[in-house]
Image: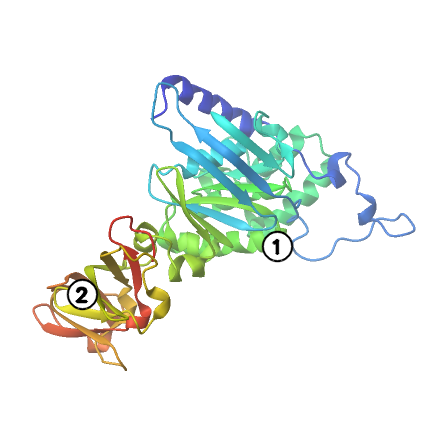
Amino acid sequence: MPGQNDLAAFASGTLRFLAFSFQTQPCFQSGRLASSARDRSGHQRPERGPNVALRAGVCDVELTKIRKVYEGQTRPVIPELDLTIPARKMVVLVGPSGCGKSTTLRMVAGLEEPTAGKITIDGRDVTRLPPAERDIAMVFQSYALYPHMSVFENMAFGLRIAHLPEAEIQKRVRATAASLGLEAYLERRPKALSGGQRQRVAIGRAVVRQPKVFLFDEPLSNLDAKLRGEMRREIARIHRDSNATAMYVTHDQIEAMTLADQIVVLKDGLIQQVGTPVEIYERPANRFVAGFFGTPTMNFLAADLAQAGDRQSARGPGFEIPLDRAPELRPAKANVDRIVVGIRPERLSLEKRGDDVSLSGEVAMREVLGAEVVLHLESAAGPLTVRTDAGSAPRPGDTVQVWLDPHAIHVFDGTTEVRL
C-alpha cells in the first residue's frame, strides 16, 4: 500500500492533471488550421461528417523495464514490465485487484513516477515530465467533473487553459457534444445529470483535447449493468472514429473482450499474456488466464499423464481423455506426469457427438439465465459447470452424463500451470 506521502503526491498530481490542459495537435496550436485543412487557394475547406471533433494523433506508447516500489515497502507493485501500446490500438489492461494495472496507467499519465524504467510516447521520453506535457487525456472512474460548472464549461475548461480561440472552443465542444448525445444538456450542471450522462461529459472533456493518447481508468465501474453496456459501445465508437492510441484499465473481462484490440493480462505486477481477445480465450497461456476469462469459469480436472506406446491420455477419477486425437495438445516435456485438463462449460454437452468422452455427476445447482441454464455438478472428477439449453436442462438431484470433446480441451502443466 502507498504511504501517506505517496497519497499526498497522488492527490496533488491529480489536481494538476485536471487543472491544466494537455497539448493539442499542431494544427490547432496557434488557433489556425494547418495547411492540410486548407485548399490549394489557401481557403479553409469545410468540415464534413458528424465526428469532426473526434481526431487524435498517431503514436506508440512504450514502457521499458518499468519498476514501481512504494516508499516504505520492499515488495514491488510492478517488478519489471515491458510493454508496447501500438498506434491506433485500444489496449486493455485487465487483472484482479492489486495486479498493478491502475498503477501502470497512472505512471503513463504522469500521476505517479516509476521507481525505475522508461516511458516514451511517440518516441519522446516522458518518464519525468508532468501530465500537462505528455499530450494525453484521461477519463477517471469518479468522473472528476467541476460541480460548479456547466457541461459546456467542463468540456471547454482544458481548451480555455490552452488559450484556444473562442470559435475553436465552440466548434470542438459542440461537435463532441453532438457526437455523445449531450447537446440538450450543455447548460446543465453535473448534479442535474444521470451517471451515464456524467461519464459522457468526462469522456467528452477528453475527446475535445484531441490528444495523442487516451487513458481510461475503470470508467464504467460506477454504472449499472445497462449503462455499462451502452457506454462500452460509446467508447468503442469514439475509439473507432478518433483512430487514437488508447489504454483502458478494467477488472471486467466483458469490457476487455468487447473493447480491446489487444488484451494485457496482469497478475502480481507481471504480464501473464498479451493477445487478441480470441487468442486469450481460445489459447490461454496458463491456468490463471484460462480461469480469469469466461463466464462461467473454465472447468479444471487434475489428471495423470498416461502413456501407452505412442499414445497419451489424461487419466483421472472417472475419466480418461485421449490426447493423441489432438496432437498439438501433447505435452512438450517428456518428464511431465501431472497435468490439468481445462474445458469450458459451453464445450460440455448433454448429448454425445462423435468420439466424445463421458463424465457423470449429480446436479447440485441450476442457474436459469433465460435461454440458457448453468448446471453445477458434483462428480468423481471434481466440480463441473455445464452451460446448456434451458429446454433440456435437468433438475437438482438428477444424475446426468455429460460429454466432452477431446479436441476442445486445454492442457496445463500440473506444477507450473503453463499451457502445454
Work out whether residue 382 or residue 259 is closer to the camera in this orientation and state it: 382
User: Label 2: how many residues lie within 10 Å, few (<14), some (14-19) or many (20+)?
Assistant: many
Residue 51: x and y, percent? 65, 54
* 310 shown above or below 5: below
Q: Which residue is mark 2?
A: 315
Give the residue drawn at x 9%, y 72%.
Answer: 399
* Residue located farthest toward the bottom when viewing the structure as drawn: 354
Residue 167: x and y, percent? 74, 40
* 398 shown above or below 250: below
Label pair 2/1, CB-CB below 8 angstroms: no
Residue 299: x and y, percent? 24, 60
Which badge, 2 or 1, comes first in the chain's sequence? 1
Q: Residue 244: in sight, yes or no?
A: yes
Q: Which residue is mark 1?
A: 241
Instruction: Give the amino acid type for the residue marked by disc 2 in the picture.
Output: Arg
* 112 shown above or below 208: above
Label 2 or label 1, whichever lies nearer to me, is 2
* Residue located farthest toward the right when viewing the structure as drawn: 41
Instruction: Give the amino acid type for the residue marked by disc 1 in the picture.
Output: Asp
Residue 117: x and y, percent? 52, 29
* 117 shown above or below 155: above
The figure's colour scheme reads rainbow
Where does the C terminus fall, quadrant-wise?
A: bottom left
Q: Circle 2 sits in a helix, a strand or a loop, which is it?
A: strand
